[in-house]
Amino acid sequence: MSTLLECRELTKNFGDKTAVDHINLCIESGHIIGLLGPNGSGKTTLIKMINGLLTPSSGTLYFKENPIGVESKKHISYLPDHTYLNMNERVSDIIDFFTDFYEDFDKARAYDMLEKLSISPSDRLKTMSKGTKEKVQLILVMSRRADLYVLDEPIAGVDPAARDYILNVILTNYEPSASILISTHLIADIENILDEVIFIQNGQIRLSSSVDDIRAAEGKSVDTLFREVFKC
Amino acid sequence: MAWNLNSDRPIFLQIVERIEMDIISGKYQPGDKLPSVRDLAAEAAVNPNTMQKAFQELEHTGLVYSQRTAGRFITEDTHMIDELKSSIAKEKITELIDLMQQLGFQNEEILSLIQQIMKGETS
């Protein structure tokens, strides 16, 4: 096991609002980690810093002991919360684009997953439903052989049957040495595939533990604990 | 597809129990090779590290043994499997008796009720 990602006192301010507040976090290889927190708790801000889309206000952030930059982007596969893909393009064109763009993109894997989910590569994105667009994006992200996958709300718009398939895709398509960071509200659906969870609130880490430790100590699921901790 | 795991108990314990049942019921025969951690994790829809932990627990109790390169196998000690079977039976029956006592039944009543039901009678 090696350390993939390390945050020290990581902070991001937007004006007088602090979105991420002195977070210390270490992600080792070979784990599936759930980043859980209520709306506006700083999940997406943290994820955007990991992917170099936002610059930290203070603190440090290292991927494999190097700062975030061109090199880290080669090894981190990112599913953003909003799409950036051109809606006029066909799936096959986007796959060619990804093949050109990322050295670690596995085209055969992408076509295989499209076939299993009955998505036609010649369809244009704009003709697809919200859920199908999400599936395409997740297929693109999971078809890279990355060291770290960062998935921001990957299953929100997808039906339960496809959700099961997507979780299976996640479980079977990452290398044992890779790690996956998943941010989501749908805790119950993904709880079993996580080995660790991080609860984040007001930009700070509220709890960081393994799923089975939580269940053993609290006698309840992570989903139930979340509802209690963040009760409105 | 996903195994029926409930949500409030540690996942690895539930996997251990499930594999124990598969051994007792004969789905896995003594000496059979277990699927790989990754394959079984995908089948159960759980994290591979959790499956690994369950396997380690099974190895610890001796029900499963690993051979360094060949994989993991079910114990050939049928005595051990029988013992597990009777200990689970005792546990389940104790649970049942506790529940019936909570419902207000006396031991003799519980016994006669069980006999009735086994004979196919409806009271």
Image: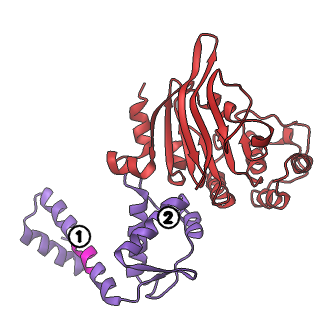
Chain colours: A red, B purple
Left or right, residue A88 beside residue B47: right
Mark 1 element type: helix
Which quadrant of the figure contains the C terminus of chain A? Answer: top left
Q: Which is closer to the viewer, label 2 or label 1?
A: 2
In this figure, which residue is indicated by the disc labeled 1? B91
- Say which of A152 and B65 sits in front: B65
Circle 1 Cα neighbour tier, 10 Å, few/some/many (<14 / 14–19 / ≥20):
few
The span shown in magenta is: B86-91
Q: Is residue B45 magenta?
A: no
- Relative to A36, say whether A194 is above or below: below
- Relative to B72, say whether A113 is above or below: above
Expressed as whole percent of the image width and height from the top left, the position of residue A141 reads: 75, 47
Expressed as whole percent of the image width and height from the top left, the position of residue B7 reads: 41, 52
Camera sees residue A73? yes
| Kind of residue at disc 1 | Glu
Left or right, residue A150 beside residue A87: left
Which quadrant of the figure contains the N terminus of chain A? Answer: bottom right
- Relative to A90, say whether B67 is above or below: below
- Say which of B25 and A44 sits in front: A44
Expressed as whole percent of the image width and height from the top left, the position of residue A211 reads: 45, 49
Camera sees residue A157? no
- Count the marks: 2
Chain ID of residue with mark 1? B
Q: Residue at x 59, y 67 (%)?
A: B38
Check if mark 2 and mark 1 are on a common chain.
yes
Q: Is residue B88 magenta?
A: yes
- Corner quadrant of residue B37: bottom right
**Residue A186: image tag:** none
**Residue B51: image tag:** 2
Give the dominant element type of the magenta stretch: helix, strand or loop: helix
